[in-house]
Amino acid sequence: MKPELGVCYYPEHWPEEMWAKDATRMVETGLTWVRIGEFAWSRMEPTPGDLRFDWLDRAIEVLGSAGLKVVLGTPTATPPRWMLKKHPDMLAVDAQGQPRKFGSRRHYCFSHQGYIQECARIARIMGERYGRNPHVAAWQIDNEYGCHDTTISYSQAALRAFQHWLEAQYGSVDALNTAWGNVFWSMEYGSFDQIDLPNLTVTEPNPAHVLAFRRFSSDQVAIFNKAQVDVLRPLTDAPLLHNYMGRILDFDHFKVGEDLDIATWDSYPIGFLSDRLEVDEAHKTAFLQQGDPDMQAFHHDLYRAVGRGRWWVMEQQPGPVNWAPFNPAPLPGMVRLWSLEAVAHGAEVVSYFRWRQAPFAQEQMHAGLLTPNDKPAPALSEVRQTADDLAQLGTVTQTRADVAILFDYASDWAWQTQPQGAGFNYFRLVFSAYRALRRAGLSVDFLSTRDIPEPGYKLIFAPGLATLDSDLEHRLLQGCDLAILGPRSGAITRDFQIPKAGRPGLSGLSCDVDLVETLPPNVHRTVDGGGAARHWIDRLSGTAPDLLTFTDGTPALKGTDGLWYLAGFPDEHLWVWVVEMAAAKVKLDIHPLPEGLRRRETDQYVFLTNYTAAPINWNNHDIAPCDVVILKKNAPRKG
């Protein structure tokens, strides 16, 4: 399909006489989608049962009549104040036992049955009213699950639900005691109602207990989301979606996405650079007003997988945000670059947050496409230019990449539970592999552990995959010419025990992890020939050939024809070496890129994006600062 542009709009924030003018101006800017309603519960229902949708009826009609397609949000991320009087125990509780109070947003516990019923009720009312409205072309359920550390709750509602979940999972408390190894420290339980939540313990709680609670907490998000899906499905033919967040790994997005039609995410490149990436100060300075060259693309590719090929950017940063440690403005050209990069990765829609900057409340310093006094903000002209670009570009069709990364949310929960070293982090490990592949000029797909495809990939990387069984190993090897695992792959069972077969327990590779060690940030383990490993080192033995060795003579990489195992967390130089070796092994062409330049291939085009503030000449193509060059495949080359 042809990619389109949209914007987030809040009619309840502005006088009604402004709505028609805003809608006309949106269309003139080249926008075709508008999201509304996701925070407006107090205006829809100011007191229990007092339903007031007349204003929303008019807003939808004004926007739709102007030619805009409406994404209507269910308002369940912001329960109104009266909801707490009705359900005083619905608040989430943090790990210190303190309630997450009213006065902001996302202050509910996913396990509270009364609140879930309220959400289903308001979704049903909205579905019955707008489900067949010709202007409502999509539905957003809730808003940004997990944002503000709200996935995990230690409330009484969560405790009761967790105990029931455990009983369903294990069947008997004896089975649970065995699975968790509760004989250690005399932690055995006599019944499920004796099991508490794993917080406020004297020292580290049992990691099996913590991991089970993390799995439960993720399941609660999926259950919460499905309650609204089940209500809306019979009432509308429009697609259902949710807007996920960057580097929020507290719940399994693949599982939530199984019940939805489209995955969307909220892209804030400059905010994420300072707030959600561990990079050195030189890197942050170089990309201060552009964002990291790989962070957005990583999530574009991840959410394309979560959405089973259908995905959007629901909120694209158009100017300074309000929530990061520092909030510089994007360099000229970057809003257009971010938009076209999303399209290159398959976005059906790129929607900007927001139409007009709010003059009040928490986000009044968050820029929009217009200033609070209705003047054009700097991004408005870039959005208009992007709309023209898309009109010329036409349909952009994705093609399966040659390389994929296996991404597993439960592995992040496991390594957060027991990292065994302050420098080790699952996201950082996977992101480093992704960055290495992007620097090699390769397009990348993501896969879940439940979604290993039919054969076709040349390479699949699965770094840090905590749990690995024989079925997954078999499907992995069948899906590609070469699979690269490690470090820390196959290290634990689902119940956080060392596997009986040992680590990593691979049937297709004679490779054993004899011990593990973690290193402080200033210590690296160098590799013969160049590069080093950091953070985490697996000491390997076994008859599989050593493909790389550390300078102390121990294996750094073992492998056979179809399966390799990495013994450490590679630095940038070692990743380059591993990618080059793997590409040569499977006869895959790579395209090494200069710093800040990235390449994305679709069925018809090659997109070159320059994240730097300087011009780049690469392969006889001149790419201006903060610009995108789109090459038609099989077109004559310059020079």
Image (cartoon, rainbow, N blue to C red):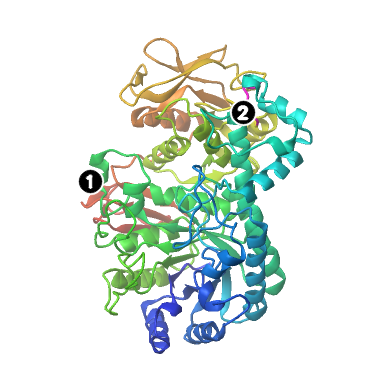
Residue at image position (34%, 71%) is 360
Q: Nearest to the eye among marks 1 and 2: give it.
A: 2
Residue at image position (58%, 39%) is 410
Q: What's under tag 2, amino acid-wise?
A: Phe
Q: Position of residue 164 (x, y in %)?
A: 73, 44
- Which residues are the magenta region? 495-499
Q: What's under tag 1, amino acid-wise?
A: Thr
Which numbered disc flags the more N-terminal residue, 1 or 2? 1
Q: Secondary structure at mark 2?
A: loop
Q: Position of residue 333 (x, y in %)?
A: 27, 62
Residue 293 in sight here: no
Residue 250 in sight here: yes
Does residue 497 belong to the magenta stretch?
A: yes
The main secondary structure of the magenta stretch is: loop
In this rendering, would 127 be left or right of 9?
Answer: right
Label 1 CA crowd tier, 10 Å (few <14, some 14–19, many 20+): few
Task: Say which residue label 1 marks.
Answer: 285
Residue at image position (54%, 32%) is 201
Q: Secondary structure at mark 1?
A: helix
Residue 196 is labelled as: none
Does residue 533 belong to the magenta stretch?
A: no
Q: Position of residue 286 (x, y in %)?
A: 23, 46
Query: Do residues under tags 1 and 2 come within 8 Å of each other at their CB atoms?
Result: no
Task: Say which residue label 2 marks.
Answer: 496
Label 2 CA crowd tier, 10 Å (few <14, some 14–19, many 20+): many
